Image (cartoon, rainbow, N blue to C red):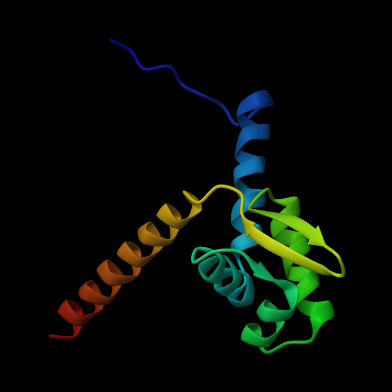
């Protein structure tokens, strides 16, 4: 049986670009930290600002990037805005990243030995 050879065009390209957009949104230590914190439940911007240790405008910009990528949802309540994960399975990706890091560290140790 012959496998179908795909090309990076049309719908395939659009889908890969969408995937890249999600990964780019996660490609910052502060945003990774925010997603990790939101895995424990929703947080208001004021809490996240204190936890990240940056000014509110910087944290708001990070949250905006995550929201545009479809990673978080916001809920305005009075003057406060609360964020939560839109799709908690994003944490599976974190597990995969940890597995890559562990394997890489294991290989580095073996090369030194």
Percent from the top left, x then y, of residue 57?
84, 78
Q: Is residue 91 left or right of residue 72?
A: left
The one nearer the camera, 11 or 4, is 11
The residue at 68%/87% (across/down) is 50
Q: Quadrant of residue 37?
A: bottom right
Pick out the residue farthest to the front. Answer: 78
Q: How many marks?
A: 0
Percent from the top left, x then y, of residue 62?
73, 69
The one nearer the camera, 58 or 47, is 47
Q: Give above or below for 102 relative to 70.
A: below
Percent from the top left, x then y, of residue 83?
68, 62
The residue at 65%/27% (across/down) is 9
Pick out the residue farthest to the left. Answer: 113
Q: Quadrant of residue 76?
A: bottom right
The residue at 33%/63% (across/down) is 100
The residue at 70%/51% (across/down) is 69
The one nearer the camera, 26 or 91, is 91
Q: Give above or below for 17 relative to 23.
A: above
The one nearer the camera, 23 or 64, is 64
Q: Quadrant of the N terminus?
A: top left
Q: Quadrant of the C terminus?
A: bottom left
Q: Is residue 4 left or right of residue 41?
A: left
Pick out the residue farthest to the top. Answer: 1
Q: Give above or below for 44 relative to 73.
A: below
Percent from the top left, x then y, of residue 36?
51, 68
């Amino acid at each position: 049986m012959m496998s179908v050879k795909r090309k990076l065009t049309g719908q395939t390209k659009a889908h890969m670009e969408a995937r890249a957009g999600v990964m780019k949104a996660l490609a910052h230590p502060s945003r990774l930290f925010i997603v990790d914190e939101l895995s424990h439940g929703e947080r208001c911007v004021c809490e996240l600002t204190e936890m990240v240790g940056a000014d509110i405008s910087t944290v708001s910009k990070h949250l905006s990037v995550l929201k545009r990528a479809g990673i978080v949802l916001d809920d305005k309540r009075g003057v406060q805005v609360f964020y939560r994960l839109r799709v908690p399975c994003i944490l599976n990706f974190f597990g995969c990243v940890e597995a890559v890091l562990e394997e890489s560290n294991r290989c580095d140790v073996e090369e030194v030995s």
